[in-house]
Every structure is written in structure tokens, then in C-alpha cells.
Image (cartoon, grey):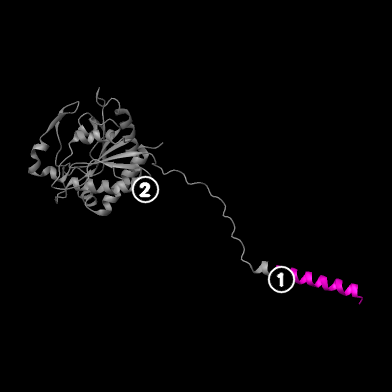
């Protein structure tokens, strides 16, 4: 082999060796992670931007003789004169309506916030050492907090006439409810249908179960759409059993959530 050929072969071997080493190092290096495909951007929460006022009806202390004067206050509601508040009803075993209303409202508040709503409550506790607030303050509360809807949570005390829920909405009273009666009635219809579709039993004794009334101060003093829901009959054994259990209270909250979502559908 001539010196020229030998030199050329040596150069090719060197280049080939370098290429092999470089290839080996590249193969040994970890591969760069693949860029994940961009998925669709998450949409807004279903109730984002909504403000909901929850009114857990009554208060344990309304029955406290210490607050008799406060309870005796009266005010005209556009239709008739009514007292500040009442004690509410109870089950045959003495479980208070105000406690049931409070616990359902607490469960409902958590669920509404999970869906993006802002939730405001007309009372901040359930205690024998507290009273009210009066029904006129409850009614005004929705406008005070800029609510899209005021939901007053109650339970009925009909004497053993069956169970099930029904809803009160305001009738038209000029100068009082003429601005909210229409929207309230539409939202009440949606709530009734959605709650029934979700499994809540419609009242067996209130016909029709959507009651348009001029008598309820909480509704008459409201300046935002308002509904008052009687979730069941505390004197009915079946309803009472559900109302006094934690799982039952959560079920009522779930039914109300379905109703509120339907009422506020965009």
C-alpha cells in the first residue's frame, strides 16, 4: 500500500470511529419528552357569576321567651299585617324545623360554591340564644347582597296529610311584587320540575304544588326573584325520617341544587 493510500485509509477510519462514538452517545441519551397535545380549555363553572341568597327559615331562639317582644313586632307586607317571625314546626319527636332548614342550607351552600356561585345566608347560626331575623329583613336580604335568586328553605307541619315538597311564589301586588312576580313564578316552575325529575316527591296534599300567594312576607318584601320551598311534611313519618337524618338532609340539598340550576339556567 502506498503512503498516500495508507494515509487516506487512516483518515477514513478516524472519521468512522468518531461517527460511531457520536451515534452511541446519542442513542444512550434520554429522549426529550413529547409535548402533550393541547386539550380544550376548561369552561366556566355552571353557576359562575351568580349570587344566591339562602334563607334557612326560622331560628331556634324564636321560641325563647326572652325574645317575645322581638317576635311580637309587626309590619304590613303589601297584603296584610304579619309578625316578625314564628317558631316554625317540628317532627313528632320534637326535631325543630329551624334546625332542619339550617343543616340543609349548609349542605346546599357547599354544593353551590363548588359550581361557582357566591352564596349569602340570612342567618349565621342556629341557636336558642338567637332570634330572627324578621321576615321583612329576610325578604330584603336578596337585594342587599345583589342576589340573582332568593331561596327560602322551610318544612311544613300539615297534620299527617302525607309527604312531599311544594313551592310558594309571590303573586302580583302593585308597588310590592309586580317587578318580581313573573320571574319568580317562572323560576318556581323550573325548580318544581327539576326537583321532581331528580327524585323528590311532589306534595301529596298541596294541589297545585306551585302555590302563587300574596300572603308571605319573605316573598313580598323581596326585590329579587324569590321562592319559598316547603321541602316536606315534618308530621309525615316518611318525610320526618329523612329530614332528621344526615343523609336525608344531604339529599334535600341535592334536590334543591338541581332546582336552583334549572331556575338559573342561562
Quick one: label 1, few (<14), some, or many (20+) residues within 10 Å?
few
Residue position for label 1: 21
| Rendering coords of residue 188 (x, y %) | 31, 35
Say the numbered circle drawn on residue 188: none
Foreground: 243 or 40? 40
Q: Is residue 186 visible?
A: yes
Q: Residue at x 36, y 48 (%)?
A: 114
| Rendering coords of residue 183 (x, y %) | 33, 30
Quick one: label 2, few (<14), some, or many (20+) residues within 10 Å?
some
- Disc 2 versus disc 1: nearer the observer: 1
Quadrant of residue 187 within the rendered picture: top left
Residue position for label 2: 114
The reply, left or right, for residue 83 in relation to residue 45 is left
* Magenta stretch encompasses residue 156: no
Q: Residue at x 30, y 26 (%)?
A: 179
Q: Is residue 209 visible?
A: no
| Rendering coords of residue 124 (x, y %) | 22, 45
Foreground: 158 or 252? 252
Amino acid at each position: 500500500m502506498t503512503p498516500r493510500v495508507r494515509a487516506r485509509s487512516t483518515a477514513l477510519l478516524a472519521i468512522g470511529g468518531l461517527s460511531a462514538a457520536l451515534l452511541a452517545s446519542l442513542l444512550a441519551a434520554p429522549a426529550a419528552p413529547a409535548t402533550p397535545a393541547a386539550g380544550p380549555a376548561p369552561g366556566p363553572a355552571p353557576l359562575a357569576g351568580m349570587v344566591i341568597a339562602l334563607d334557612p327559615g326560622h331560628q331556634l331562639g324564636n321560641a325563647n321567651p326572652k325574645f317575645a317582644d322581638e317576635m311580637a313586632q309587626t309590619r304590613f307586607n303589601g297584603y296584610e299585617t304579619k309578625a316578625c317571625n314564628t317558631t316554625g314546626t317540628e317532627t313528632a319527636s320534637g326535631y325543630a324545623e329551624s334546625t332542619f332548614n339550617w343543616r340543609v342550607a349548609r349542605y346546599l351552600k357547599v354544593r353551590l360554591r363548588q359550581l361557582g356561585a357566591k352564596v349569602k345566608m340570612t342567618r349565621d347560626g342556629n341557636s336558642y340564644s338567637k332570634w330572627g331575623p324578621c321576615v321583612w329583613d329576610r325578604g330584603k336580604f336578596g337585594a342587599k347582597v345583589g342576589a340573582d335568586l332568593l331561596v327560602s328553605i322551610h318544612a311544613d307541619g300539615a297534620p299527617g296529610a302525607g309527604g312531599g315538597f311544594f313551592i310558594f311564589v309571590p303573586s302580583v301586588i302593585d308597588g310590592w311584587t309586580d317587578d318580581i312576580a313573573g320571574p319568580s313564578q317562572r323560576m318556581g316552575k323550573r325548580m318544581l320540575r327539576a326537583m321532581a325529575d331528580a327524585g323528590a316527591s311532589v306534595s301529596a296534599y298541596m294541589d297545585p304544588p306551585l302555590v302563587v300567594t300574596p300572603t308571605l312576607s319573605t316573598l313580598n318584601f323581596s326585590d329579587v326573584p324569590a321562592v319559598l320551598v316547603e321541602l316536606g311534611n315534618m308530621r309525615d313519618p316518611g318525610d320526618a325520617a329523612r329530614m332528621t337524618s344526615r343523609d336525608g338532609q344531604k339529599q334535600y340539598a341535592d334536590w334543591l341544587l338541581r332546582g336552583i340550576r334549572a331556575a338559573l339556567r342561562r
